[in-house]
Amino acid sequence: MGLSLERRFERYCDGIVSTLLHADREQPARWYIKGLMLPGERKSVEPMAARVQPAQVRSAHQSMHHLVADAPWSDEAMLSAVAERVLPKLIEAHGAVRWIVDDTGFPKKGRHSVGVARQYCGQTGKQDNCRVAVSLSIAGERGSLPVGYQLYLPGEWADDEVRRRKVGVPEEVVFKTKPELAMQQIEAALAEGLPRGVVLADAAYGDETAWRERLANHGLTYAVGVRPGTTVWWGEHQPLTRLAPSARRGRPRRRLMRDDTHQPIAVADVARALPGQAWRSVTWREGTAGALSSRFARVRVRAAHRDQPRDEEWLIIEWAEGADEPAHYWLSNLPRRIAWQEMADTVMGRWRIERDYEELKQELGLGHYEGRNWRGFHHHASLCIAAYGFLTLERLAGIKKNAARFKTPALPEGFRPRGAETDAAS
């Protein structure tokens, strides 16, 4: 007979809580991870303490709050421990592996919680008062797992010593763009020796030529989004055959040259110039309502940014039948002879990150942390990812997600959890 759910959970947690480096933190961490998986609308500390320890809510709340808001344990160590347990089961021997970069927003009222600013929020689809985190997930054919996660700290926060001090932003944390944070996570994954995969990212990351070149310099294959105005050398749109010397003294590299009749072309104009026979309909996955398919085209181009000589790569375009404009453009160093099916499966592979965030937010309370400080924001997220890792293992073992339910004790009589979206004290 196999192990019970409770015993499987305890064994999983044994390796996770060992990263906390203090025995007094281990039991609160088990409570916290379990509380994240129990049913309940709010996954903040107070209601979780009431669910996991209804007979001693006050003491459980204090110890769980201290674990998340104050205790100095390493988020990187915990995420590494989760990856060590989940990725060997998730990544199949000969299956496709993808490294998916993305960011996610959390609407938040007030201005005192770390990182909160007026910025684009994917959850609301507009400029909003929110905080944003950048993540790296590793995906296989049967699922995905976040292996890197960090709050984006806007410049107005990074440069304000008073605000930094109030919320405990570490001294070594300086302003970094979202692509810089993503590259930091990618390089950490490489250093850790995690299973390599094709890097996927949207145009907020992929449109930076230097970012793509850094991926290639690490020996990574990528298929990343670019914006419609990104320019390339293609077809008759080629530079002059001679090269101009580098403008930087001592640099041997030479620039491509343009004139009125030698100009690059925007990728949106490439799409409009392609003949009908260039397009191929490809089904790229089975959705809940049936097969998902679209039209794709691909051509060999060279990126034209700053007129540096570059190798050829793929420009891949998705333009659905009947749509007024293409939906997506990608630049990719995928193999020249890649099959259409594999190409479409790869470039459309970012859909898995949507499932990551849907479950992390809706079922595991990723955005429910009510404190203001840097440490608490990241500790809560790491514990959410640990809970997600356990659920992933349950699914991979053939156990339905809804079967991974613990017996939920009744809440104490008269218990009413506090509201959520305001700037609660940490």
Image: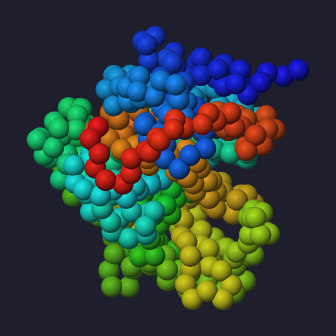
Residue, x 88% and y 20% (percent of image)? 1
Choose between 53 and 299: the one closer to the eye. 53
Locate residue 117 relative to residue 398 in the image: left or right.
Answer: left
Locate residue 341 relative to residue 233 in the image: left or right.
Answer: right
**Image location of residue 324, percent across then percent down:** 57, 89
**Image location of residue 283, percent across then percent down:** 77, 68
Locate residue 189 relative to residue 285 in the image: left or right.
Answer: left
Colour mapping used in the image = rainbow
Locate residue 401 relative to residue 350 in the image: left or right.
Answer: right
| Quadrant in which residue 69 is drawn | top left
Residue, x 44% and y 54% (percent of image)? 104
**Image location of residue 258, percent across then percent down:** 34, 75
Q: Quadrant of the C terminus?
A: top left
Choose between 307 and 299: the one closer to the eye. 299
Q: Which residue occupies the extreme top position in the image? A: 23
Choose between 383 and 309: the one closer to the eye. 383
| Quadrant in which residue 372 is drawn | top left
Residue, x 69% and y 76% (percent of image)? 295
Choose between 69 and 219: the one closer to the eye. 69
**Image location of residue 240, percent across then percent down:** 39, 74
Q: Is residue 111 visible?
A: yes
Q: Is residue 336 visible?
A: no
Residue 76 to residue 416: above or below: above
Residue, x 53% and y 50% (percent of image)? 41
Residue 313 to residue 410: above or below: below
